[in-house]
Amino acid sequence: MKHPASPRVVALVGPQGAGKTTLLESLLRVTGAGPLRPPGGDGAASGRAMTLEMAAATTEFMGERWTFIDCPGAPEFLQEARHALMICDAALVVCDMGPERAAALSPLFQFLDARQIPHLLFLNALHESGPSLRALLDSLQVVSARPLVLREIPLREGDRMVGIVDLVSERAWGTTAEQEAALIPLPETDRPLEEAARRQMLERLADQDDALLEQLIEEVVPPPGVLYEQMARALREDRLVPVFIGSAERGLGLLRLLKGLRHEVPGVEETRTRLGLSASGGSLVQPFKIWHLPHVGKQSLARVWRGTVVDGGTLCGGRVSGVLQPHGAKHTPVGTAHEGEVAIIGRLDAAHCGDRVEMDGARRTTGWPVAPPPMHQVAITAEKRTDDVKLPGALARLVEEDTSLSVDQEPDTQRLLLGGQGELHLREALERLNTRLRVPVVVHPVPIPYRETVRRRGTHHARYKRQSGGHGQFGDVVVEVRPLPRGQGFSFDSAVVGGAVPRQYIPAVEEGVLEGLRRGPLGFPVVDVAVTLTGGTYHSVDSSDQAFRTAARLALAEVLPKLEPVLLEPILRVELHVPRDAMPRAQRLVTGRRGQLLGFDADLELPGWEILTAYMPQAELKGFIVELRSASAGLGSYVAHHDHYAELMGRQAERVVSHQPMAER
């Protein structure tokens, strides 16, 4: 069959610890390319540590160029993997032999299915003893909307894998990794298993093809060449998921995997069509990863969809400064990037992740993955006062590099809040802020926006009088304060009659009241109160806006402690997303943090997952994502929104008030 001539791009995705990086290293070794990282480098390249950032590597196989993108598997870095999936020709989903991995693959399969991204499945570590291949496929099929079609089965001697049978050609190969494995006879004892597996593969294909279904009914089986073509077409149209087997660590089955990719993965022309991109026009590129490097500036890892990109040429209304070929941490200048290739392009300053970039500018892409809301936050300040002015710009660059980070400002303290998908995610982001962006910061706990209110109503008279030569200051007010229903905020009214307080001073009284409510007797802003100006007096010479504002502030400061002040804590409505078997642990975790369970239901988008809804005090969410992930095999997540304030009493309230700095109380 005819193979695409243009370079093809495959993203390696899957759960954390499934062996994606080890698989990529083995594929590079088999194709004669250099390792992703040199020996003695950090362990992420060889599977000894967690991959935190995507890494691209280019190689050749049978005269064709391939770019493989190793994507992080930890839930905190899912957005990084999604960006790579948006520009790939196909995804290679890597999964080890544990059936419990099915829940971990559910969000990934949902993303691939929803966007109709062609994908294949590689079952890794098949040399190890464990559950049967059929049991594993059955558990994975539950979370895949596309049929999983087994392309190969293992030949075993006891628990040891000694060969692989291609179900299309019905030929068997030994398990030599470093060179083309020799054909071996298919043992007669394995033939019934092979025939049953092949029949099931043909039936799955026939479900997608009426002509093949008629042939099977008539007991006519097309030759292997036709079946390969049907398999490639079904993958290209995202109608099924071919399943390959092997071992990344031992290099088993990798040549068969590479040949399967070569025969079945679509090229850039077909991917362009799937994405609705035109084949005509000038150069078109799409960044999907951005770095800001010292002394270098902005660099964009991008797919060239159309035309070429030349170092020194014009793109995005500016001059390209460097075109490099990525190979892990090594970037090699190449001068030109051609259609279909992945390249690092320097100085696309006006383009962001997902933008479609042409010669004259960049356009946002509809459907580009929206980052999930933050699940963990820290407050930060610049370590050096001289870096205060640099910090907002550095944070903007950090968020541009990783869109699943967020920056907000805490309204009470005005401190900057850096949010992310978990503790590890923020730790890695702060390290980049310190080393790559060179703005070290100090981390503080996120302040909880406690409020306070009063339970009783009361009236108070306050006078502000000062004489210092010439005009003095005189303001005299009588105010009534009463509680409002929870969530009503604040109201101010004037009931003054007879001009006891002239009309022009009433706005100043309201300003003074608001100042008095900014920090109540417990040390927090006062809410849910109504204040009415009921009386007062004035002096024709000494009264002023400032005097009445001061008198009103004094009135609030003196009366609020007498009205049974009570502390209010923010309550969030939280939606937890966890695999079904983790639901009991999630419920105990919520109730153990003073949460109120509201209900749970099946997650209609993620098979095998459930959604738990609860009210939780905001203070109890500190470190919650760490415990939730621990209780759900690293998979759980949540979305939280402010819902209401509730009274906090007893020792917990005393503890909050006692920890308020004296200067703030």
Image (tube, rainbow, N blue to C red):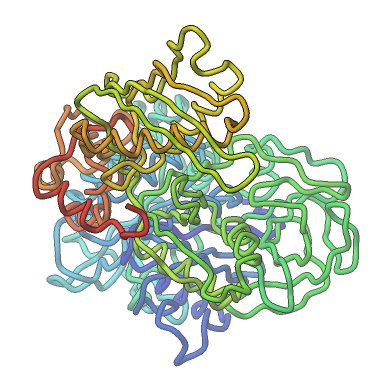
Query: Which residue corresponds to the image point at 68% horizontal and 51% vertical from the top-left?
Result: 352
The location of residue 561, given as percent across then percent down, is: 24, 38
Q: Is residue 166 visible?
A: no
Describe residue 110's horizontal placement relative to residue 285 as left or right: left
Query: Which residue corresponds to the image point at 70% horizontal and 46% vertical from the top-left?
Result: 355
Describe residue 2's horizontal placement relative to residue 665 as left or right: right
- Within the image, what quadrant is residue 174 found in? bottom left
How many numbered dots are placed on residues in this image? 0
Task: Identify which residue, 356 or 65, lies in the foreground.
Answer: 356
The location of residue 47, given as percent across then percent down, is: 37, 76
Describe residue 665's horizontal placement relative to residue 292 as left or right: left
Q: Is residue 110 visible?
A: yes
- Residue sticking out furthest to the bottom: 40
Q: Is residue 564 above or below residue 379?
A: above
Q: Is residue 645 above or below residue 29?
A: above
Describe residue 114's horizontal placement relative to residue 245 as left or right: right
- Within the image, what quadrant is residue 534 found in? top left
Task: Identify which residue, 254 or 35, lies in the foreground.
Answer: 35
Query: Which residue corresponds to the image point at 31% horizontal and 30% vertical from the top-left?
Result: 643
Query: Which residue corresponds to the image point at 83% horizontal and 73% vertical from the top-left?
Result: 335
- Within the image, what quadrant is residue 502 found in? top right
